[in-house]
Amino acid sequence: MRVFEKYHPIVLFSYFAVIIFMTMFFMHPVYLAITLIGAMSLNLVLNGRDFFKSLKMYIPVFLLIMIINPLISHNGEMVLFYMNDNRITLEAILYGLAMATMLVSVMLWCSCYNSVMTSDKFLYLFSRVSPVFSLVLSITMRLIPRFTYQLKLIGQSQKTIGMDYTIGSLWHRIRCIMQILSILITWALENAIETADSMKARGYGLQKRTTFSLFVFEKRDGILLAVIFLLFVISGIGSLLGSTTFYFYPALTGISSTLKHLFFYSVYAMLIVIPVGIELVEGLKWRYLKSTM
């Protein structure tokens, strides 16, 4: 049961905009750990076992960034060893680890965003502000998965008639790939014409054309939006007071565990776990209702 995605689009968009913004700018280790765990948990709730399959893409990116930074940056006081007369410092390794965590967390949050914010929700939010821009952006975001799927379909079809681009001589593979690309381009042009005809038939571009939407801003949406805004403001105040400040160079600063910092850590964690918390609460309610039937 995916309950969080049923909230109003403005609530969903606001939540992910706030989370991705803070993930990119809060480089404190505690904040990075919280956002990474939250992103992984939400991906697991939304995608189930498919999330573990996608880890094969995130893990290499994580390791690559973590390894590259100490090789190109030699700042820091604690030298661990030398490689080709270049210092490899603990601070550079930890900074690379923090950068990798931040980037992978943003990628995971974007994956959650794509699962929750469908094209119709995006169009609903921005069609009144800029209908043309929102439509173009929505179509563009949809093109990549559609092209990928169609490319796989064409490739499999071509294999059945002997045009397998994975075997044979180099010239044979080039011919097969060119044939596949030619079919893909033809399909894309035909699909564009069909889309244009469909939009024209539905009255796109008419001045007095009305739209229909199933999205209704309810009381629960207002409450959740207010909670998100409140937690965001408190986290922002915490950042101004120094709770997110952490220096890797020239030496590592300590992680403070004062009552003030623990409070702001908790507020940020509450903001991060909102979607997972909603899913868990609704799941428990559903199980209770089934048990009482």
Image: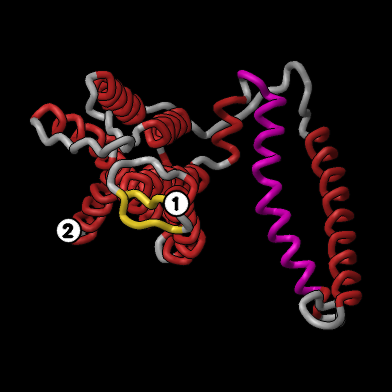
Q: Please tell me which residue lies in front, 176 or 44.
A: 176
Q: Earlier in the sequence, mark 1 or mark 2?
A: 1
Identified at 79% across, 67% down, the residue is 154
Q: Residue furthest front?
A: 85
Instruction: State whether residue 41 appears in this view.
Output: yes
Picture coordinates of residue 236 (x, y %)?
30, 22
Q: Please tell me which residue lies in front, 133 or 99.
A: 99
- The quadrant in which the C terminus is found is bottom left
Q: Please tell me which residue lies in front, 26 or 129.
A: 26
Q: Please tell me which residue lies in front, 114 or 225.
A: 114
Residue 149 in which image quadrant: bottom right
Height in image: 81 above or below 115?
below
Q: Label 2 crowding class (10 Å Cα cut-off): few <14, some 14-19, many 20+? A: few
Height in image: 165 above or below 128?
below
- Determine whether label 1 and label 2 are within 8 Å by CB: no
Q: Is residue 135 magenta?
A: yes
- The quadrant in which the N terminus is found is bottom left
Identified at 39% across, 56% down, the residue is 82
Residue 172 in which image quadrant: bottom right
Picture coordinates of residue 48 (x, y %)?
40, 61
Alpha carbons under labels 1 and 2: distance apart: 68 Å
Tell me, for residue 292, which label it has, or none: 2
The amino acid beneath tag 2 is: Thr
The residue that label 1 is drawn on is 86
The amino acid beneath tag 1 is: Asn
Picture coordinates of residue 118 (x, y %)?
55, 42
Identified at 85% across, 39% down, the residue is 197
Residue 229 in which image quadrant: top left
Question: Which is the main secondary structure of the residues drawn in magenta?
Answer: helix
Picture coordinates of residue 120 (x, y %)?
59, 37
Identified at 74% across, 67% down, the residue is 153
